[in-house]
Image (tube, rainbow, N blue to C red):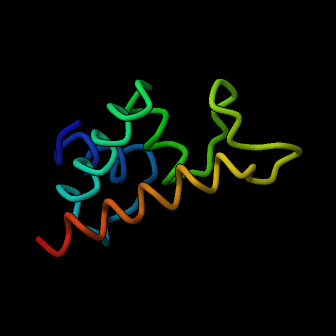
Amino acid sequence: MTRQQVKKYIMRDLGMIPRHDCEALAQAITDMALELEYDECELMWLLLENRPIDALHTHSYGFHTGNGRHIINTLQEKYYEYENN
């Protein structure tokens, strides 16, 4: 995933101006996708829209599962690591 893809998604699909470092966000999502062997776009949707990922069991009855919280927290940790570099 690239910085431009993240920025375009936030601006066009969410109708917002990015407040965070899109490059760091793209790197965090790509890393997590490789670790989980899962689709980058769905991980981005989970993080930015809280959209459930059924295959990864991220939500139950509209709430985050332990796995969902772990994925989101790991994405955030990775983002802050990349943002500070």
Give how far across and how far down residue 37 sits, in percent: 40, 24
Residue lying at 45% horizontally and 57% vertically, measured from the top left:
74
Observer-nearest of 22 and 85 = 85
Instruction: Give the total of numbered labels.
Output: 0
Q: Is residue 17 above or below residue 50?
A: below
Q: Splitting the image into 4 quarters, where does residue 44 fall?
A: top left
| Residue closer to the observer: 70 or 15 | 70
In this rendered view, identify the residue nearer to me: 23 or 65: 65
- The extreme bottom residue here reads 84
Residue drawn 41% across and 33% down? 41
Q: What residue sits 82% from the left and 48% below the top? A: 62
- The percent coordinates of residue 45 (x first, y second) are 50, 42
Is 18 left or right of 63, judged from the image as shown?
Answer: left
Image x and y of residue 43, in percent: 47, 39
| Residue 34, position as x, y percentages in the image | 32, 31
Give the residue furthest to the right: 61
Q: Is residue 23 left or right of residue 79?
A: left
Extreme residue toward the left, this view:
85
- Image vertical order of residue 1 relative to residue 11, above or below: above
At x 28% / y 46%, what residue is drawn? Answer: 6
Q: Nearer the viewer, residue 7 or 56?
A: 56
Quadrant for the C terminus in the image:
bottom left
Q: Determine whether, in the image, residue 2 is placed left or right of residue 49.
A: left
Q: Quadrant of the N terminus?
A: top left
